[in-house]
Image: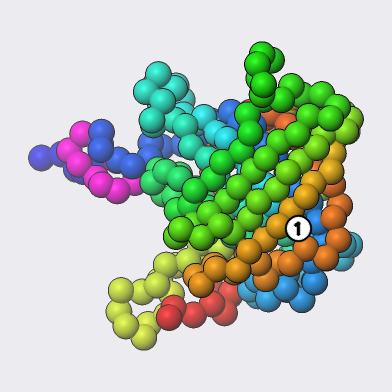
Amino acid sequence: MTGLRGYFHPKTATGMSSLVPSPPWRYSGDLLTVEYRTDPARVRELLPEPLELADEDPGAVALIWADWQSCSTSGEELLDPVRAQYKEAFAVVRCRFRGQTYSRCVHIWVDKDFAIARGLHQGYPKKLGSIHQTRPHPYGPAPRIEAGARFGATLAAADRRLAQAVVTLREPSASGGFVNAHPMAHHRWLPSIEKGKGLALDELIESGAASFEGGQPWVGDAELELFEAPTEELARLEVREPIAAYYRQVGVVWDGGRLLESGTSGAVAE
């Protein structure tokens, strides 16, 4: 008899039903990034031990909308688009661990189940949401990538709008922002199946792109609003000072991470 196959649940005799294939995972996407400053104390409360606030600009936040197409090595998902296309919106802060600066995703919403599964494996705290952003196009009424182009972006979850933004491009930029420009420091947590036994999995991991390519970034200005909701806390990262907004097309390959520390976060299973 053969063993069950599949990188993720469900495991079957063939592995064909697995929610996600084995890495590497390949991504093509359009990113809208809005950077701003919030109260550093609100960032600090989202950093479990042993992570600390970044030394410089500790209150900096990036709220990012992404319109993705993704696939495994074979690329077969691209020809079955329901398996490849999804959207997400996520909030990123920076932190420090052993003298190195990392980025960390503290909130994230996606609109497909396979994206949730991949994110849980990578330490992203993914939830289901409704995400939309204006797509550029060289013809018709859609904006071109040029000075003065305007893009809208919205995020909702559980029937409540959580964020909305309007980005106006100004000029080409040397980068697509600084908050999400470092390797990610994420935790992978899983409560024990035995009540009161804490966490069965408690890992601090480093994750990042195995390879990256990107088009010309554009910088501009953003009007950003965050909204309260009964089961979401994005609005706690209140906007105190705008920094900048960016648009960029990117291509990324993810092919695993690295364990930094185990069993030291102090997180509890509740």
Residue bearing mark 1: 61
Q: Position of residue 66 (x, y in %)?
A: 61, 39
Q: Position of residue 24 (x, y in %)?
A: 50, 34
* Residue 7 inside the magenta-drawn segment: yes
Amino acid type at mark 1: Val
Query: Quadrant of residue 96 in the image?
Result: bottom right
* Residue 75 inside the magenta-drawn segment: no
Q: What residue is drawn where x is 63% and y is 55%?
A: 163
- The image quadrant where one finds the C terminus is bottom left
Q: Position of residue 45 (x, y in %)?
A: 68, 76
Query: Quadrant of residue 133 in the image?
Result: top right
113 with respect to 250 (left or right): left
Note whether residue 211 is visible. Answer: no
Q: Position of residue 179 (x, y in %)?
A: 78, 52
**Farthest left residue?**
1
- The image quadrant where one finds the N terminus is top left
- Quick one: 112 or 19, which is closer to the camera? 112
Q: What residue is drawn where x is 45% and y is 53%?
A: 128
5 with respect to 231 (left or right): left
Relative vertical location of residue 113 with respect to residue 123 in this rendering, above or below: above
**Farthest bottom residue?**
196
- Quick one: 91 or 190, which is closer to the camera? 91
Which portion, as a residue range, is magenta?
6-14
Q: What residue is drawn where x is 83% and y is 65%?
A: 240
42 with respect to 186 (left or right): right
Note whether residue 145 is visible. Answer: yes
- Quick one: 10 or 136, which is closer to the camera? 136
Relative vertical location of residue 237 with respect to residue 253 in this rendering, above or below: below
Which structural element holds mark 1?
strand
Magenta span: helix, strand or loop, mainly? loop
